[in-house]
Amino acid sequence: MHVAVLGAGVIGVTTAYALAKRGCKVTIFDQASSIASGASFANGAQISYSFVDPMASPAMLKKIPAILLGKDPNIKQKPSLEPAHLRWGAYFLGNCTEPKATSNLENAISLALESRAAFQDLLAAHSISFRYRQSGKLVVTRDKATLARMHHAAKIKTKRGIEARVLSAQECWQVEPKTEPHYRDIVGGIYAPGDYVGDARRFTKALAQICIDDYGVDILLKQKVFGLATDSGNVIGIRTDDGVFSVDKVVVCMGAASAKFLSPYNIPLLIEPVKGYSFTIPANDEAPSCSLTDADHKIVFARLHSEMRIAGLADFDGDDMSLKEDRLATLKSFAERLLPNIGDYGHSGTGWVGARPMTPDGLPITQATKVNNLYLNTGHGMLGWTLACGSAERIVEIMMQRHAGSIHLKRATQ
Ligand SMILES: Cc1cc2nc3c(=O)[nH]c(=O)nc-3n(C[C@H](O)[C@H](O)[C@H](O)COP(=O)(O)OP(=O)(O)OC[C@H]3O[C@@H](n4cnc5c(N)ncnc54)[C@H](O)[C@@H]3O)c2cc1C
């Protein structure tokens, strides 16, 4: 079976690996000139199996008026009456109930556990250097209601075998002493010792090379895919500048571009590009070694060897993928205010913007489509690095027709 994987981000490359491992002939296509040029380039570096909580929740619902009025500095919403955006918003609101948030979290945990197992298998089989480290993850808050919600989520996680401990402020400082001088105002947090950090781009590039060297995968870069080639309603290939490329099956792993790509085929995906920013600075001895999330400011700090990767913000900017200097400056000034002594904030040239391919329920779309031979592995939102390996295994199992009828097939294509 010859499969075309569309997109060479972390999702496309892990999908290609899962297919090639099972003996399929795989060709990856990407319009960019290098692997992992999209959202997988410089993300927050958190491989956070313990924190897969979807964005849609009753707590988020309360914040929406402030967001719409432009009063939340962490989340910006460009006014838009585009039907796809409004539809996404309506579904997002529908997922902000307690029962939906809980069932979405349960489903995300299942995928996280599968991802952890698949990632460990992959790393046992191949030696890959990508600044990977079991850092543990600490999420702190200054808000008692947020801490209570963390407590509730921790109970669900613990039941599923994930170690996630709720801590007092004092205990947070003990876990990560570097936070104590700057985080005197927190009320507590949640700590997951079993979480990791790692550089998604380095990993994706190295895995792509393994795919080429060990499994004969072809990777065609600078190849924009314009559409699908079909015959009697079946996908028989893809269309690029070079003409039609014939394959047996196609998997769409185009991240935030997936919805637009599929709309001509009457496959209306609800995926909204949500821009986030990151910057990377040289770290010093004051940099925390534990991966740290400030839940109130939605900023993550991850130490990658001698560097600190700092990521945050969520901007609904439509198709505008440009890096806005004022937003990057907002992230930098927040981070410097929170942890001023961890590295050289004056270091320039490392700012980055990427688009999280967000679904309203925070769960990726990993399923067959109504079009024969066409599959989806996309919509990983803020968790694509964490959930990549499990999603790849799921879609490939579906493709191998072993998982037909799974929960993801039941989820209607939105
Ligand atoms: C600021 C930020 C911080 C994040 N932090 C974390 C984190 O800490 N942990 C975590 O788990 N996740 C994190 N994420 C989310 C994670 O990075 C994404 O979910 C993940 O990278 C998505 O991978 P992808 O392969 O689906 O998309 P991408 O990496 O965007 O890949 C899609 C590819 O498709 C290609 N493509 C698109 N259209 C076409 C076309 N027509 N023809 C050919 N190729 C095409 C693009 O060039 C691109 O290379 C973060 C994201 C952002 C933006």
Image: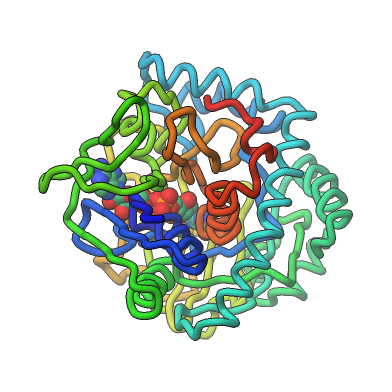
Q: In which quarter of the image is the N terminus?
A: bottom left
On screen, residue 97 versus residue 15, left or right, reads right
Query: In front here: 314 or 12?
Result: 12
Residue sitting at x 26%, y 42%? 238
Figure label count: 0
Residue 336 percent across, percent down from the top left:
46, 62
Query: In front here: 280 or 120?
Result: 120
Residue sitting at x 38%, y 45%? 250
Q: From the viewer's perspective, is residue 177 above or below residue 364?
A: below
On screen, residue 204 versus residue 33, left or right, reads right
Q: Which residue lies furthest to the left in this view?
A: 242
Residue sitting at x 58%, y 64%? 47
Query: In front here: 372 or 212?
Result: 372
Does residue 323 appear anywhere in the picture?
A: no
Query: In front here: 181 or 326?
Result: 326
Q: From the viewer's perspective, is residue 271 above or below residue 130?
A: above
Q: From the viewer's perspective, is residue 377 above or below residue 212?
A: above
Q: From the viewer's perspective, is residue 363 above or below residue 137?
A: above
On screen, residue 133 versus residue 319, left or right, reads right
Residue sitting at x 27%, y 54%? 29
Residue 135 percent across, percent down from the top left:
63, 75
**Image quadrant where residue 235 sits:** top left
**Image quadrant where residue 28 sits:** bottom left
